[in-house]
Amino acid sequence: MKVSILAVGRLKSGAEQTQFNRYFDLFNASARNLRIPPLGIVEIGESRAATPEERKEDEAAELLAKLGGQRLIALDEAGKEVTSYEFTAMFSRLRDEALDVAFVIGGPDGHGDALKAAAHFQLSLGRMTLPHGLARIILTEQLYRAVTIMQGHPYHRG
């Protein structure tokens, strides 16, 4: 199982990058015990198209071109909200089935229709709109939390 995050935009240096790196490193160290390779990160630039719809479609096409047969999970505010345990169960099933997975974070305008149609699952981190860097941090923390739950580690006390 390979796990990747595909994202529109780049993390800002400073606190945002520091927090992301913290959970990225923790995930990679813990995932190794489950024979999960290091987390892959693919970033693309925001589209410069004139309209939101054109930007979403441009970004969707570029993100889809970066996928290589991975199970696509689109982060979207209209997606399904899950608990950490439900997220862990989903992640564990993907690992047990040896499926590669890509979590995709769209640009400021959201995901294009082509990407939504290609998604195997649409996941919401909550009903509030989050900055993309913060969404990436929260996702990476939840990935770390999932591998610790899978190992019975006391990190998750929920």
Image (cartoon, helix red, strand yellow):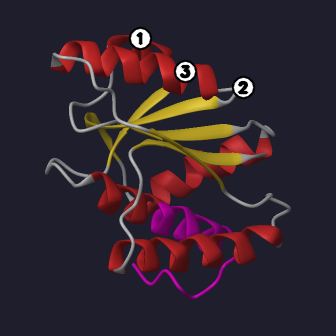
- Near-viewer residue (140 or 97): 140
Q: Which mark is residue 41?
A: none
Q: Amino acid at mark 2?
A: Gly
Q: Which mark is residue 68?
A: 2
CA neighbours of label 2 inside 10 A, class few (<14), some (14 to 19), many (20+): few
Position in image of residue 7 (x %, y %): 45, 43
CA gap between label 3 and label 1 equals 8 Å
Labels 2 & 3 near each other (Cβ < 8 A): no
- For mark 3, what is the residue? 64
154 drawn magenta: yes
**N-terminal of the two: label 3 or label 1?**
3
- Near-viewer residue (37 or 49): 49
Q: Is residue 64 above or below residue 154?
A: above
- For mark 1, what is the residue? 114
Labels 3 & 1 near each other (Cβ < 8 A): yes
Q: Is residue 57 above or below residue 35?
A: above
CA gap between label 2 and label 3 equals 9 Å
Task: Determine whether, in the image, residue 131 is placed left or right of residue 138.
Answer: left
CA neighbours of label 1 inside 10 A, class few (<14), some (14 to 19), many (20+): some
> What segment carries the magenta color?
140-158
- Near-viewer residue (61 or 138): 61
- Picture residue at 73% right of the left edge, 38% below the top: 100
Q: Quadrant of the C terminus?
A: bottom left
Q: Amino acid at mark 1?
A: Ala
Q: Secondary structure at mark 1?
A: helix
